[in-house]
Amino acid sequence: MITRRRLAGGLFLGTGAACGLAHPLVWARSTDALSETSRALHALNRLAYGPRPADIQALQAQGAQTWLNNFLAEQLEPQKLIMPTALASRLQGLETLELSQAELLGRYRRVAQAATAAASPQASEAAAPNAMDGAMSNPTMGSASADGANAEAAQARARREYVRPVVLQAAQARLARAIESPAQLQEVLVEFWFNHFNVFIGKGPVSVLAGAYEREAVRPHVLGRFRDLLGATAKHPAMLLYLDNAQSVRPGYRVPALQAMANPNAARLNGLNENYARELMELHTLGVDGGYTQQDVTELARMLTGWTIDGRSARLGRSGPLFVFDPSRHDNSVKHWMGQTIEPAGQAEGERALDLLAAHPATARHIAFKMAQAFVADQPPAALVGRLAERFLSTQGDLKAVTRELIASDEFWQPQRYGVKFKTPYHYLISSLRALGLGAPTDVGPLLQVLAQAGMPLYGAQTPDGYKNVAGAWMSPEALAQRVQFATSLADRRARQGARLEADAQRLMEALGPLWNPTTREAVNAEPAPMRLALLLSSPEFMKR
Amino acid sequence: MLRRRQLLCSSAAAWATGAYALWPGLSTALATAPPQAQSGPAQKLVVVMLRGAVDGLSVVVPHGDAEYRQSRGSIALPAPGSADGSVLPLDPLFGLHPALARLMPLWQRGHLGFVHASGSPDPTRSHFDAQDYMETGTPGRKSTPDGWMNRLLAQLPGPVAPTRAVNMGPTPPRILAGGAAVANLGVGPRALEAKAIDNPELQAALGRLYGREGDLARTLQETKESRIEMGRSMAMAEARSRQAQRDAQMSPGDNGRSSDPSADAGAPTARGFAADALRLGQLIQADPHTQLAFTSVGGWDTHVNQGGARGALSNRLGSLGEGLESLVQGLGDAFEHTVIVVMSEFGRTVRQNGTGGTDHGRGNVMWLLGGPVAGGRVRGEWPGLDRSALADGRDLAVTTDFRGVLSPILQQHLGLSDHAMGQVFPGFSGPILSGSILRS
């Protein structure tokens, strides 16, 4: 607290006198105003991907308190915010964002077909594995035929033509929104909830579906009801394929002859796969200590048999969701799950399971803990977790209410939280671009590379637990070396584009004025001018949020 | 592939005369290289974690167990010699997955062994908890703040050095979390290229920016020290490998090797893990201070269509085998003083599931490689695959605690005292694996 006061006081003197900020007196007149500025910065760091110069200008023009009140109110009602034209037209230019689930899977199928066609030009369509069988027909597994090299080349071409644009455009949309959208909290929440219900583009057809999953299953519900979010993820082809439920069938199931002919891989299905059932309880809802047993996992897997993808609609390229409940795949016997006897009821068994899981106190605690950890502290205060869990239960999982409770909590605003949470590579990257007032670049390739190199490839978390959100998972000599490298190359690129680095650094220091603490200003200003931009982006207050 | 196997086999004959003979070119380079300033070779431990639970029953296959074939159906591997893609015989009960054929020369020389039905005493089937327990070394206890390799680092006899422990990977693993400083080697071909942070002026400026206290200051300090050391070591390793390449070019066909100089010099043809593992091995070899190293490989969670002799798991094991071979190659003469442990959080169900894969199970197999390893044997008490012997009626039982395999390595190989063992594995009182897994 004391250091913060000092910091803000120092800022007032330093910036007001030396840099001629637009309205230094408005925000710096009293100690309260100073702490309001700190609060506003804290909000930008935790509820957004860091301040942009325009945010600081607005904050100074309106006064920190007014700005902050408006900001918080707006962020909880993102639908009322107007998307900048540049961002809107950029998103409109991404034509694969319009593709239906079936069209997307069709693109993935083209890769397998290309290989088959190259290997034997006669037999293409019929022998091409059905995309819905996921890892079973992963075209990256390569064929061992004499035409293997040919087939591989054809696959690579098809992948470049049909799959890569889908993945790239999904990434472009995500990054452009994160950098430029005024609905920052929504973007932060999309990242949070996607990560909570993670799917991985490295697993076969999930590559083409991950973007659609984010748009269709995650984004609409991040401030909605948890049960809706849970249901949407459960039924999305990306999740059905990623965690294999699309292929989990009752024991003794026989694939209908016609289907088996169209899809040789499907013919092999003959029983349970408990992958989704386990992660549904362990990661998505109850949490690993949520009090379920191995028996509960197996029983839940049985209840969820038949939740799959409509292969016929997928092949015909129909529009709309591809989820289907296939009664012939469903295990119709009585189950004993979580202390309850579940009478046979088809799809309703799975729905009932989702109902129960979404309303379970263990789920409330699990979600509360994860949100408090992501937004407040690596070791979140127990009292806050308890209150968020209560709110979750009392509102039947209203995520807007829980998020509001979080933002309104004393714990969130405690000054000792300011600037201490080590940024993930994703947050660091986005916040750097925002700090410099840059938009999303046309070619996001280099940004994706930075994320991959840092161990946080976009849509690339292989395991269903997603990425961790604590310093212990990210802070290391390698991370430091990479961030300093990124900051330096960003500065170098600016220099190559003709920017004067000295001026750039000066501008950054002024534009984000209140972010920098006096010791950083002093230390940076004492160094040679070409180094200053990189140093600012490597400073403690920029590495952390 | 063929060429590599030939290479290993041909050098197998020369192995008897000592580990130096494994890479003849390297040994020549070493003979002419200036002696290193060190007092005796440091004992080394490399841990490779297979994240996602590798199917141990497909790695070291209990083909002699009557229940195996019945439980595994379409993914069962054929018994030795019985068909195309059959397992490689290890002993009457077990065979090795054919995708790991390149490791057989190590087995034959007694430098590769396994401990089957090993794992964690905690019954969790959560990947994340199980990995956590295997990395903290305290199964069942979640509050342990640090990893056992970091505690081990603090307990190692001898002087501290910034590169005494090396993690290879983009992010810090739980197993090395803790108070002792750990060096970090990135992945990819550019992992050790000079970076902005190697510029002394920038380093000094960052030092002033971060001050003396706090996590960033500490991380910067570790970064500075370890990068200098690793850069130096890698330069040395590269000089040796260039020398080796020259030697190889000067004597084509020597020792029955192929006449392709790049293959003879052991330049890795594989991408990804193999290249990274080679670099890690070279670094360990060239840095006399390095005693502990860790890396992990993911992608073992084979719920669907894992395949048998061919297929997804086979491909993955092939790359892993190639990586381990590269690691051994990179280690060169240091292999003689190195124990490599390969482990995974738990095994997979004995029965094949409904989608041609396997689900989360319990017991797994631990792999031990290295000069000091008394290999050529599959150790551990085999509980059998009979339904009555299975954990929860479905999984291979754990008969050896993973700490019971690691403890003798820490004590006999790395020289830890009983007291130090208590720090590394608090609350573990055995039993340790019976019979020595190390050469005396």
Image (cartoon, coloured by chain):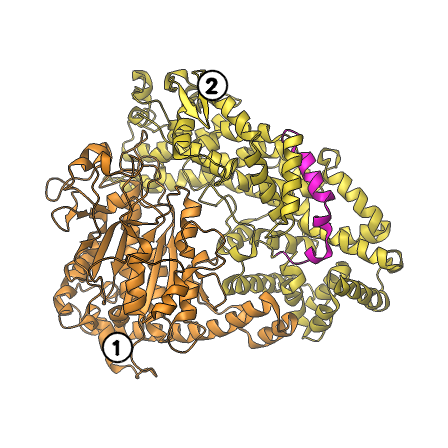
Chain colours: A yellow, B orange
Element assignment for label 2 = helix
- B319, above or below A306, in the image: below
Most foreground residue, A149 or B397: B397
Element assignment for label 1 = helix
User: Which quadrant, please, contains the C terminus of chain B?
Assistant: bottom left
Residue B427 position in % (x across, y down): 39, 58
Is there any visible trace of residue B205 in the rendered image? yes
Alpha-carbon span between mark 2 and mark 1: 69 Å
Residue A112 position in % (x across, y down): 36, 33
User: Which quadrant, please, contains the N terminus of chain B?
Assistant: bottom left
Q: In this view, does A374 lie to the left or right of A206?
A: right
- B426, above or below B302, in the image: below
Is there any visible trace of residue A243 in the rendered image? no
Q: In which quarter of the image is residue B302?
A: top left
Q: Quick check: is A39 in the magenta stretch?
A: no
Crowd around label 1: few <14 · some 14–19 · many ≥20 (10 Å): some
Q: In this view, does B236 lie to the left or right of A481?
A: left
Residue B204 position in % (x across, y down): 60, 76
Most foreground residue, B69 or A121: B69
Labels 2 & 1 near each other (Cβ < 8 A)? no
Q: What's the residue type where badge 1 is placed? A: Ala
**Label 2: chain?**
A
Q: Give the range drawn in magenta.
A: A395-421
Crowd around label 2: few <14 · some 14–19 · many ≥20 (10 Å): some
- B192, above or below A150, in the image: below
Asked if marks 2 and 1 fall on the same chain, the answer is no
Q: What's the residue type where badge 2 is placed? A: Gln
Give the residue pinned by disc 1: B29
Q: Quadrant of residue B165?
A: bottom left
Kindly report which numbered mark, 2 or 1, lies closer to the viewer in this rendering: 2
Give the residue pinned by disc 2: A347
Most common secondary structure along the magenta stretch: helix
